[in-house]
Each structure stands twice: as structure tokens, then as C-alpha cells.
Image: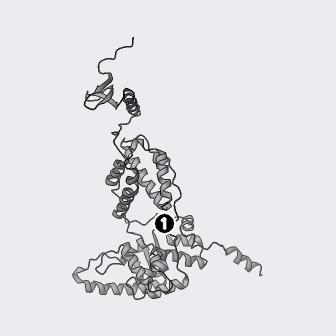
Amino acid sequence: MSKRRSRGDGGLHWDDRRQRWIATASLGYDPSGKRIVKRGSGKTKTEAKAKLKEVLRDHEDGLAIAPTSYTVKDAVSNWLAYGLTDVDGSTVDNYKTLCEKHVIAELGARRLRDLSADDVDRWLSAKAKTHSTRTLRLLHSCLNRSVKRAMARDKVKRNVVELCSIPKGREGRPSKALTLAQAGAVLDAAADSRLHAYIVVALLAGARTEELRALSWDHVDLKGREGISPHIAVWRSVRASGDTKTRKSRRTLALPGRCIAALVEHQKRQARQREAAGSRWTEHGLVFTSEVGTALDAANVRKFFRRVLATVDGINAGDWTPRELRHSFVSLLSDRGIPIEEIARLVGHSSTSVTETVYRKQIRPVIQTGAVAMNEIFEP
């Protein structure tokens, strides 16, 4: 005969109210003296015992498993609400849009503990047909960080998203660069624009648009002094932290004469705007501002930039963005024969590999140094 269970050891019984079989097991007592009881339920005895075994296995692994109703949507919503406290507001909005439109809409109803690597692979593969690789990376990152947060809070055993590779998506919009003739035409067209100095500095110094929007007059030296040329100190950006994109992005750039002249004129123009605005002016010490002294956002700059391009023959303004002034800076320097190492230093890249990867269409592929030197040694 089988041994009778001791009182409290658990068992299997039918619950009339829930209309399910309930399997229970007693695992001792917690520090307060309360009995620890684990349960599994199912429509059949076998299903209830299988669920109990799963709960016991999770308990032995040291996991305080979340309710089985905890879904991918719950995990993503929790991450969006509490896991982005140090992230810029615009970035949070972008993450929310991506998560709601793609992650929650298509995977949200899946129970988190049932989410498999195959589910994620199929989801990413479908997205790869309609979205760029960059978007796929963002989607994978959002889901990965959500599940990782849930895992840290004992909602799920492991993070299957980390096991999945990101497929290659559709090609994004190719970056472009202005030719020398186009660049000259754009500079001439911008002469009477309130963003004239912005366009000149972006094109002739190669600063990022996020760096120029945060540039303050305290970081501009238009006169220079003995041994130090007029320059701008690119030490800040509009990121939430105020820091530049990378450590090497923090740099001091000497200004070409055309930049100096444009900034001098811009300073005078801003003084007139400040006087005209009167009490409406809000002083932030920024170089590039609205008509009342407030900071410009990316949309402001893009609108004014395209307004300038619309007056240039042979250029479709809608196809261009301000960041392509930086691409043009790289392209013009490369065409001039400037080494890639020096270009990487000027644009604030952490290595030349970043420059080659991001600006591969603007970098001159032929290294001419050896040929030039040999032509001088052995006259043709």
C-alpha cells in the first residue's frame, strides 16, 4: 500500500467554484511562520499536476514566478513607464511609438513565459521585409530591455530575445553630399537667411546639428589670441545629459575665415532681434535661437534649411536634411586629399572605422600618398 500523505503535504482536489482540478504542495514555512503552499490548476488531473511540477521547478530555481497572465505587453509597458528615467523625452516618445506600433501590437498578447526565440525570430524576419536594419535594431533593443527588466524582477526565467540575431532589413535612405559647386550655391543662397551662420559652420566645420543647436557664445572665440586661432568648442549637445555623442566628439575646432565672418554678422543680427523682442526675449546664451531667444529644435532647423535649398537650381529641397551638410564636409575634405585619420578627428569619431562605415560614399577610395611620393622619386 502507498504511504498516506501527512497533513499539509498537499494533494489533488476538485474546485467546484473554479471548475478546475487543483494540485497543491507544502514547502515548509516562511520566516513569519506562514505555511508556503504552491498550487497548479488545470481542467484535468494530469494538467493540474503538470502545472504544479512547473511551479515547483521554478521555486527550486529560486524564482518567484509572476502570474501566468503576465504578458509581453505588461513587460514592455513596465519598461516604458519605469525603465527610462534618464532618457531624453524625445527618445522616450520614439520608443513608445515603436513599442506600441510594432512590439505590443504584434507580440503583446503573448504570455511572457511562453515567448520563445522562434517567436522573436519570425517577428523580426517579417519586419525585415518592410523596415530598415536600424529600425530592427531599435525594436530588438526595446523588447530585449523589457524582458531583461522583467527577468530581473522574477517575472520570467530567461531572456530569449538575447538569443536572437537581428536580420538585415531594407536599405535606408542613402546619405548624400553636396558637390563643391552645389556647396558654393547653397552658401550663396543662405546669405540672407537667418540660418546663414548655422549653414556656414555646419558645412565648413563639420559639427553635428545636435552640437550646433546647443552651441553657446561662451564656447565661441571669434578673435583668437597669440598662438590660438578663432575657434568653437564643441563640448555640448542637445542630448538629455548635455554631453556630446562620444568622448572624442568633445573637440575644439579652428574656424575658417568665412565662418568667422558669418558668426560676427550673426552676433549683430541676434543683438537686433534681442532688442526687437524686448521683454519677450529669453536669454539662454545660445548662438542659434528663435526670434525670442529660445532653443531651436530639429524641425525648425530642417524647415529653414530646406527653405534655403528651395532657391538653389538643381537641388530638390525635400530630399535633403541638415545632417548632410556634415556629410558634405567629409566629402569635400576627402576630395581635397585630407587623410581619413584627420577627417575622423575633425568630425569627432571614435575611430576611422566609424568614419568609413557611416561616410563610406563620401570617402575617396583611392589612397594616393604612395603614388605621389613615387612620382617624385622616379620621375615619369
Above or below, 110 relative to 319: above
Above or below, 79 relative to 321: above
Q: Indicate the quadrant where residue 56 lies.
A: top left
Query: Which residue is at the far top?
Result: 1
Q: Exactly how many numbered labels are in the figure?
A: 1
- Give the residue at x 34% y 43%: 70
Q: Position of residue 309 (x, y in %)?
A: 45, 83
Mark 1 is surrounded, within 10 Å at the Cα level, by few (under 14), some (14 to 19) or many (20 or more) other residues, namely some
- Give the residue at x 55% y 72%: 343
Q: Nearer the viewer, residue 37 or 238?
A: 37
Quadrant location, the C terminus: bottom right
Quadrant location, the N terminus: top left
Query: Which residue is at the far left?
Result: 279
Q: Indicate the quadrant where residue 299 lies.
A: bottom left
Here the colouring is: one colour
Element under label 1?
helix
Q: Is residue 196 in view from this perspective? A: yes
Q: Which residue is mark 1?
A: 248
Q: Position of residue 287 (x, y in %)?
A: 36, 78
Above or below, 359 relative to 22: below
Q: Nearer the viewer, residue 189 or 239?
A: 189
Q: Nearer the viewer, residue 240 or 43?
A: 43
Q: Amino acid at mark 1?
A: Lys
Q: Position of residue 280 (x, y in %)?
A: 23, 80
Q: Is residue 214 in view from this perspective? A: no
Q: Position of residue 22 (x, y in %)?
A: 32, 28
